Image: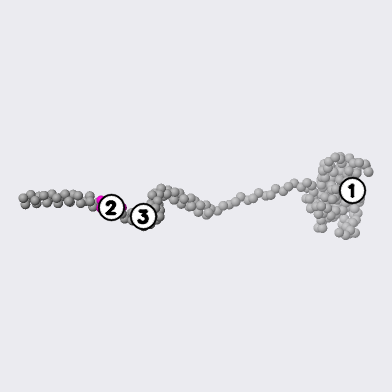
Amino acid sequence: MLGGGKMKGDAVSGGSRNISPMVSFLLGAAVATVCVLFFMSASPGRSLVDVAAWSHNNGTAAQHHHLRSVADDLDAARNLTVVAAPAPAPVQAASPYGDLEEVLARAATADRTVIMTQINAAWTKPGSLLDLFFESFRTGEGGVARLLDHLVIVTMDPAAYAGCQLVHPHCYFLRTTGVDYRGEKFFMSKDYLEMMWGRNKFQQTILQLGYNFLFTDVDVMWFRDPFKHISM
């Protein structure tokens, strides 16, 4: 009996050793669950945030890496030296008077005064009054020849302009419509009056551009300097 009892006790003892690891595992799991529930009940908002952050931690790792790469690219772009192309030169609108302002600027005196005359093709032929007009300056007295540097010849047709450029540096072609200025215009004829009105309007343009002028006909001989007797 005693021997049998001992054997029974040994059997119970062996069964207890086999069951105790399982019981320990279940008790440990229960304790861990209780601790988690207690922590969540103590700070519910904090626990939800932490759990959400933990659950998305792996999912947002690639996004953080991408944002960091973009930031690095921006930093590199700030360190680049940008060389801008030179701005194109502003395009200046063409003057309605052609090269008039350029001609006036070349011929004007220091006080912006020019001598001005007007011709057509009939005045530019060899042996015409234009040759005598130039000769009067060259043979005049008191250094009147220097005034040729301030003489602007206004031409009324292409032939007169071409002839002027052969003998003088300051020529201007006044383009007009409605009247043919190539031939001779008789005094008080319709074309003559049109030419005179056109000349007056052109002279007004000279004043509007800020220049003074002394107008002379080609049949006036310049043997002396009239500016000695004319005050500004």
In the displayed structure, 176 sits above or below 35; it is above
The answer to whether mark 3 and mark 1 are in CB contact below 8 A is no
| Residue 134 placement (x, y as % from top left) | 87, 49
Q: Amino acid at mark 3?
A: Met
**Disc 3 or disc 1, which is closer to the eye?**
3
Note whether residue 100 is visible: yes
Q: 205 or 37, which lies in front?
A: 37
- Which residue, given by chain and number where applicable, does mark 1 sit on? 218
Q: Measuring 28% from the left and 52% from the top, which residue is drawn there?
A: 30
- In this view, which residue lies farthest toward the right? 187
Q: Amino acid at mark 1?
A: Val
Query: Which contiguous range is marked in magenta?
Result: 26-33
> Which callout, 2 or 3, points at the residue further toward the start of the chain?
2
- Which residue, given by chain and number where applicable, does mark 2 sit on? 30
Q: Measuring 52% from the left and 54% from the top, which residue is drawn there?
A: 79
Q: Measuring 82% from the left and 47% from the top, which residue is drawn there?
A: 171
The answer to whether mark 2 and mark 1 are in CB contact below 8 A is no
- Which residue, given by chain and number where applicable, does mark 3 sit on? 40
Q: Amino acid at mark 2?
A: Ala
Note whether residue 166 is visible: no
- Does residue 41 appear to the left or right of 189 in the view shown? left
> Which callout, 3 or 1, points at the residue further toward the start of the chain?
3
| Residue 9 placement (x, y as % from top left) | 11, 51
| Residue 32 placement (x, y as % from top left) | 30, 54
